[in-house]
């Protein structure tokens, strides 16, 4: 069986969630966290290695709550996203407290991930279908090409909104062959009486509810990590002096590669219902959604010991 890895970004501080570490909040009937369901679905789809991206200060709690359990199921590795983990010649600005972004998070996997891999957020539930589609894409033979060979799950916008506040979504623009032309980061998308809209200073701008959006679920070949490394150096060189918040983001890097003709991105559309814990109030919704999935027989009521 071809080696494929699930990379889980779990180093975020979850500032909007309030007190506690949102990635480790129980949501299932037996104390399962969202990652338990993602890992279950990924292993079921054929992924056979897990890499957790965490902060070093979370390691002990993280291992106790989930890591030690998953190590009994499959191969597990840990990498650490830290503010001072920078290429030679660069130093963290003394006043910087914001993480460097999802691009640097995934870059932490260099040297550990040497096979095709999928990247997901720790606090998002994606459903079974996109794991199957991305795994099948990653393991099939691909023709040699000059461009980066990338795939992503394309979720329907209406299946990704929160009842508790605005969300940011990368709206996908596709060509006639289903390839990605570009991603438009759209901020403060909320539900409206007519569907959905983006809140701006000028008012709410309508957004097509059936648009395909990126939920940071990407499939990459291992060579992409070299590209990320080169890009991070360029990113650091170009940060304006005094800017302590600019982030090296995965969708932004992919978009740059697309515009430069250096990447080909296949969008694998899915009708899967996404839900996640962006706000503290979202947790109750997630608990209820998981309960429904358990009742439907999609998951065991005791997934931890299943």
Image: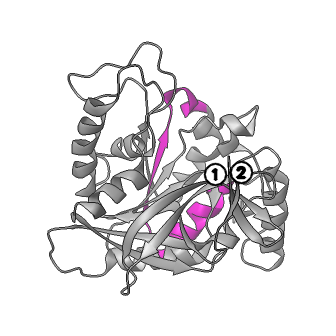
| Viewer-side residue, 40 vs 272 | 272
Q: Could you say where residue 274 lies in the image, as x and y percent from the top left?
A: 66, 67
Q: Please say if 272 is above or below 84.
A: below
- Give the labeled residue for mark 1: 123
Callout 1 secondary element: loop
| Residue at figure coordinates x 45%, y 72% from the top left | 173
Q: Quadrant of residue 240?
A: top left
The residue positioned farthest toward the top in the image shown: 94
Q: Could you say where residue 212 lies in the image, as x and y percent from the top left?
A: 55, 73
What residue range appears in magenta?
A: 33-60
Q: Please say if 269 is above or below 196.
A: below
What is the crowding at mark 2: few (fewer than 14 residues within 10 Å), some, or many (at least 20)?
A: many
| Residue at figure coordinates x 44%, y 63% from the top left | 183
Is 68 within the magenta? no
The residue positioned farthest toward the bottom in the image shown: 176
Query: Is the stretch drawn in magenta largely helix, strand or loop?
Result: helix
Q: Could you say where residue 50 lies in the image, as x and y percent from the top left?
A: 45, 55
Q: Which mark is residue 277?
A: 2
What is the crowding at mark 1: few (fewer than 14 residues within 10 Å), some, or many (at least 20)?
A: many
Q: Could you give the CA–CA distance between mark 1 and mark 2, rounded to whole angstroms?
A: 6 Å
| Residue at figure coordinates x 50%, y 52% from the top left | 8
Q: Could you say where residue 230 lies in the image, as x and y percent from the top left?
A: 21, 43
Q: Earlier in the sequence, mark 1 or mark 2?
A: 1
Is 46 within the magenta? yes
Is residue 29 something one can see in this rendering?
Answer: no
| Disc 1 + disc 2, Cβ < 8 Å | yes
The residue positioned farthest toward the front in the image shown: 202
| Residue at figure coordinates x 71%, y 51% from the top left | 277
Q: Which mark is residue 55?
A: none
Would residue 122 appear left or right of 219 to someone viewing this image? right
């Amino acid at each position: 069986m071809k080696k494929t890895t699930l990379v889980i970004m779990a180093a975020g501080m979850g500032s909007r969630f309030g007190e506690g570490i949102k990635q480790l909040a129980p949501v299932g009937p037996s104390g399962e966290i969202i990652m338990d369901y993602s890992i279950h679905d990924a292993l079921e789809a054929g992924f056979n290695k897990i890499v957790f991206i965490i902060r070093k200060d979370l390691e002990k709690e993280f291992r106790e709550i989930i890591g030690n359990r998953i190590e009994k199921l499959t191969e597990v590795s840990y990498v650490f996203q830290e503010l001072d983990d920078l290429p030679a010649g660069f130093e963290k600005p003394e006043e910087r407290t914001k993480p460097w972004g999802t691009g640097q998070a995934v870059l932490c996997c260099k040297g550990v991930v040497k096979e095709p891999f999928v990247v997901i957020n720790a606090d998002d539930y994606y459903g079974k279908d996109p794991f199957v589609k991305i795994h099948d894409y990653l393991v099939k033979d691909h023709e040699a090409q000059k461009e980066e060979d990338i795939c992503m799950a394309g979720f329907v916008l209406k299946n990704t909104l929160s009842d508790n506040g605005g969300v940011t979504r990368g709206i996908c623009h596709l060509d006639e062959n289903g390839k990605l032309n570009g991603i438009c980061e759209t901020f403060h998308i909320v539900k409206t009486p007519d569907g959905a809209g983006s809140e701006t200073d000028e008012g709410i701008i309508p957004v097509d509810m059936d648009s395909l959006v990126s939920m940071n679920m990407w499939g990459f070949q291992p060579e992409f990590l070299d590209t990320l490394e080169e890009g991070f150096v360029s990113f650091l060189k170009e940060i304006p002096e005094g800017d302590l918040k600019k982030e090296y983001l995965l969708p932004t890097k992919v978009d740059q590669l697309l515009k430069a003709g250096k990447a080909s991105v296949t969008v694998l559309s899915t009708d899967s219902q996404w839900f996640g814990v962006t706000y503290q109030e979202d947790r109750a919704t997630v608990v209820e959604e998981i309960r429904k999935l358990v009742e439907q027989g999609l998951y065991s009521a005791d997934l931890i010991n299943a």
